[in-house]
Image: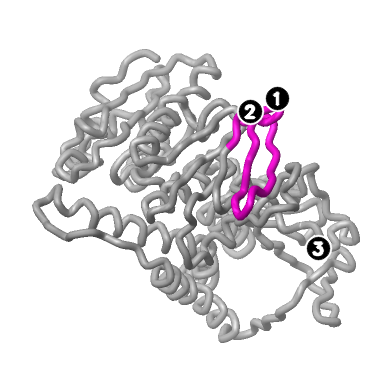
């Protein structure tokens, strides 16, 4: 049964972020080629053909999309309806003029870019994370509104492709969800790559100046402004729940439009579940996949899996990437518990040094009494992979000493996790 689940559901979740991941791989290949001289390899000038970048992205993402479509349409006892479906009752859905009835209904409609109300936005053309991956040219100067995950990934990517890039953030620092040392480190390597960052942009307005887009950032008549050729709006996501007829089914939503669910992802209407981005319980491919696993295990296997059992884990795919698990240092400090922390600079990790990728650090937080790991931030080479050593230990509820005494393979980034845990100190 588990293999079948992966075949049917996994392909769809993989397609969800395939467009952006394909472009990230192209951008990283460009950077590696450009660094050939560091390794004694003469490559000459490295150029980017954006039309070919997009063509490869379309090929990679297209395979994922076609795979899930083919899997569904070829699956026994599965009928695919293509159209906008809306509830007409608690257990009735209308699509294409036909009314479908079922005892069990699963809502998995995903989300889309959230576009804020900004004076003048209706006067300029803008891109979102969806339309950005369809760009087949190189913007002369890309303005990115939003200094968080999507904005930073696309900002660094297009700077490396060759665009001028300015990231505008309304807050006092980038990626405010992360610890301040993470924000500072990311801001540092972006600055060294030539990405310009404007913080504390409190009063935004947009206008045209010839063919350019002008973004005023201050409340005092726009003394501070940035000018660019293209604008990417990267200010968050919203659920695709606006026109589903949820009111006719009696399904509750919160003030932000997310469908309210319990710990097993059931809505307030018996026999109706909401999984994926539309329930507000996660905003990643892996959380959507885990939603499915929870519902399927509870229904088909008689299990009792819950959303509250999972540990926060995600990655920021800048280069180097950030791998995150559990609590941040800020959250641990706010909790008031006695805690220990260990931190090591990536320049002291031999694998990172040998690769010439020494930006960032690794940080682990531990409960001083239970000795269980509370969280970790790995910003650096292979941080998105090495973080799983910590994450799996957290799921096992094992003391940090299990990892500390483990023998890891040399030369890897993960081999330094036991070493750094020998240097835990009070927070």
Structure colour scheme: one colour
Residue topped by disc 1: 220
Q: Residue at x 54, y 63 (%)?
A: 16
Locate residue 224 relative to residue 241 in the image: left or right.
left
User: Residue 244 shows which numbered tag?
Assistant: 3
Give whichever of discs 1 and 3 has the lower sequence position. Answer: 1
User: Residue 223 shows which numbered tag?
Assistant: 2
Report the quarter where the C terminus lies.
top left
Stretch in magenta = 201-225
Q: Secondary structure at mark 1?
A: loop
Q: Residue at x 37, y 18 (%)?
A: 340
Locate residue 115 relative to residue 383 in the image: left or right.
right
Residue 306 in view of the camera? no
**Residue 82: image location, x then y, percent:** 71, 79
Q: Secondary structure at mark 2?
A: loop
Q: Residues within 10 Å of mark 3 (few under 14, many from 20)?
A: some
So how many labels did they put on this image?
Answer: 3
Locate residue 149 relative to residue 109 in the image: left or right.
left
Q: Residue at x 42, y 18 (%)?
A: 339
């Amino acid at each position: 049964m588990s293999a079948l689940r992966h075949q049917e559901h996994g392909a769809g979740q993989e397609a969800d972020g395939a467009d952006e991941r394909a472009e990230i791989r192209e951008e990283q290949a460009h950077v590696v080629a450009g660094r050939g001289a560091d390794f004694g390899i003469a490559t000459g000038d490295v150029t980017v053909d954006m039309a070919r970048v997009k063509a490869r992205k379309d090929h990679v993402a297209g395979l994922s999309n076609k795979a899930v479509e083919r899997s569904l349409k070829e699956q026994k006892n599965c009928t695919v309806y293509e159209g906008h479906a809306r509830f007409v009752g608690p257990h009735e859905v209308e699509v294409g003029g036909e009314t479908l009835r079922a005892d069990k209904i699963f809502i998995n409609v995903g989300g889309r870019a959230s576009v804020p109300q900004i004076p003048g936005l209706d006067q300029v053309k803008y891109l979102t994370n969806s339309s950005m991956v369809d760009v087949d040219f190189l913007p002369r100067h890309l303005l990115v509104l939003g200094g968080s995950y999507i904005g930073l990934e696309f900002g660094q990517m297009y700077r490396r492709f060759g665009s001028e890039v300015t990231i505008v953030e309304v807050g006092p620092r980038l990626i405010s969800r992360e610890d301040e040392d993470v924000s500072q480190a990311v801001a540092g390597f972006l600055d060294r790559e030539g990405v310009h960052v404007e913080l504390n942009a409190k009063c935004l307005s947009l206008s045209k100046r010839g063919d350019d887009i002008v973004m005023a950032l201050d409340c005092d008549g726009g003394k501070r402004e940035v000018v660019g050729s293209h604008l990417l709006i990267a200010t968050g996501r919203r659920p695709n729940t606006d026109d589903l007829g949820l009111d006719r089914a009696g399904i509750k939503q919160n003030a932000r439009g997310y469908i309210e669910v319990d710990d097993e992802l059931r809505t307030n209407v018996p026999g109706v579940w909401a999984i994926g981005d539309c329930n507000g319980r996660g905003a990643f491919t892996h959380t959507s996949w885990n939603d499915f696993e929870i519902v399927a295990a509870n229904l088909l296997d008689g299990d009792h899996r819950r959303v509250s059992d999972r540990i926060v884990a995600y990655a920021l795919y800048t280069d180097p990437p950030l791998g995150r698990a559990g609590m941040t240092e800020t959250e641990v400090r706010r909790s008031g518990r006695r805690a220990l922390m260990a931190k090591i600079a990536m320049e002291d990790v031999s694998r990172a040094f040998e690769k010439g990728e020494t930006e960032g650090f690794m940080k682990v937080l531990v409960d001083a009494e239970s000795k269980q790991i509370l969280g970790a931030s790995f910003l650096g080479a292979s941080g998105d992979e090495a973080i799983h050593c910590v994450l799996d230990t957290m799921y096992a509820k094992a003391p940090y000493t299990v990892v500390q005494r483990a023998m890891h393979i040399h030369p890897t980034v993960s081999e330094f996790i036991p070493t750094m845990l020998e240097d835990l100190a009070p927070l």
